[in-house]
């Protein structure tokens, strides 16, 4: 069964919404670097999810144009998505500890679009466009150049770490697909994202009692928590949901690879990092790949995606 064609913002607007969300995702690393000492990745991640889920829920409940949220009718999809959100956080941070940032980022970021494309084909949701394939290849390659700009030769890759980073990429594709499924079944974009992240936040809540949280009582710590929760989850996933409602999941996952591009630019302009020739080349390739990948959905004129 196909959902009816959607009216409102054109696919170009949906693509820009996803890229804007990815740009907000890309501020996470810089914000953490400017935050207070004493933070832990899992503690920060749990606080970020808790605040972000509350913001998304408030947005969903404040939408007077929509009926009362019917999360219960979509409990299965939201539960799967929420488990994937929590799994992503755990796999990402645990994987980076074992692989290092460079290799882990390449595997984690690069595998997401691949898994999303496989899901799309497996569910018989139509073939993947050449524009998506070319754009994804360019964007993943550019992200690899960005991540590898400071790589150092050393010990062989950690197999467990690689598996964890692949798990993070898989988890991301799963929760994007779960949210998309709930939207196709009639749940609003804000409600779908609030439901998925609400479940994820509940699953991550026990970490708040196990991780050192003293940093949260400082001005810089509170600013960090609000930035990560309100902007990089609340606002970002509200925009992400608007794009996901109109675009195919593989395209959305590819467009979010604007995140490392934003992170690289902020690293240079705010943190004083050096990008180097390889890094600038990677940034240019990512930018081109994003434009090419977005053309697949724009060319289709917002055609309906099989639910």
Image: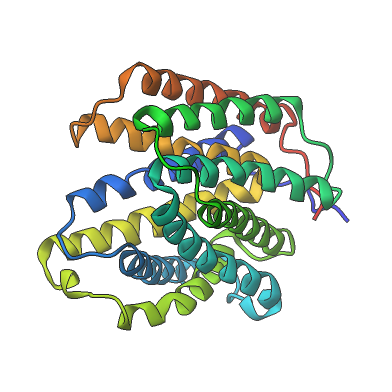
Left or right: where does residue 122 sit relative to residue 196?
right
Residue 228 percent across, percent down from the top left: 32, 57
Asked if one can make out residue 235 in the rendered structure from this viewpoint, the answer is no
Residue 293 percent across, percent down from the top left: 63, 29
The quadrant in which the C terminus is found is bottom right
Looking at the picture, does residue 118 appear above or below residue 137? below
Left or right: where does residue 108 sit relative to residue 232?
right
Residue 42 percent across, percent down from the top left: 36, 67
Q: Residue at x 42, y 37 (%)?
A: 260
Q: Residue at x 24, y 29 (%)?
A: 268
- Report the residue that reaches farthest toward the front: 155
Left or right: where does residue 41 sit relative to residue 249?
left
Residue 16 percent across, percent down from the top left: 51, 36
- In this figure, what is the number of numbered marks? 0
The quadrant in which the N terminus is found is bottom right
Looking at the picture, does residue 284 appear above or below residue 174? above
Q: How is the image coloured?
A: rainbow
Left or right: where does residue 62 sit relative to residue 38?
right
Observer-nearest residue: 249 or 163?
163
Query: Residue 253 sits in which quadrant?
Result: top right
Q: Residue at x 23, y 59 (%)?
A: 224
Looking at the picture, does residue 133 appear above or below residue 253? above
Observer-nearest residue: 10 or 27?
27
Asked if one can make out residue 280 in the rendered structure from this viewpoint, the answer is yes
Query: Residue 177 sits in which quadrant?
Result: bottom right
């Amino acid at each position: 069964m196909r959902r009816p064609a959607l009216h409102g913002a054109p696919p170009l607007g949906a693509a820009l919404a996803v890229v804007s969300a990815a740009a907000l995702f890309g501020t996470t690393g810089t914000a953490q670097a400017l935050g207070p000492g004493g933070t832990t990745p899992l503690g920060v991640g749990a606080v970020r999810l808790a605040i972000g889920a509350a913001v998304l829920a408030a947005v969903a409940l404040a939408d007077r144009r929509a009926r009362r949220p019917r999360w219960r009718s979509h409990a299965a999809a939201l539960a799967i998505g929420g488990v994937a959100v929590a799994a992503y956080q755990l796999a990402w941070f645990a994987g980076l500890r074992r692989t290092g940032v460079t290799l882990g980022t390449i595997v984690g970021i690069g595998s997401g679009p691949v898994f999303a494309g496989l899901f799309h084909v497996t569910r018989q949701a139509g073939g993947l466009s050449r524009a998506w394939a070319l754009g994804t290849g360019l964007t993943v390659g550019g992200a690899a150049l960005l991540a590898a700009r400071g790589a150092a030769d050393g010990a062989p890759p950690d197999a467990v770490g690689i598996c964890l980073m692949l798990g993070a990429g898989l988890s991301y594709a799963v929760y994007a697909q779960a949210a998309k499924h709930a939207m196709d079944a009639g749940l609003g974009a804000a409600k779908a994202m609030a439901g998925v992240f609400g479940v994820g936040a509940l699953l991550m809540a026990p970490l708040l009692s196990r991780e050192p949280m003293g940093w949260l009582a400082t001005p810089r710590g509170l600013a960090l928590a609000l930035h990560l929760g309100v902007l990089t989850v609340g606002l970002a996933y509200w925009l992400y949901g608007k794009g996901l409602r109109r675009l195919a999941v593989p395209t959305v996952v590819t467009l979010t690879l604007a995140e490392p591009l934003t992170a690289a630019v902020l690293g240079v302009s705010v943190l004083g990092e050096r990008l180097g020739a390889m890094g600038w080349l990677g940034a240019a390739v990512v930018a081109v790949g994003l434009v090419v990948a977005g053309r697949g959905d724009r060319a289709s004129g917002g055609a309906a995606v099989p639910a």
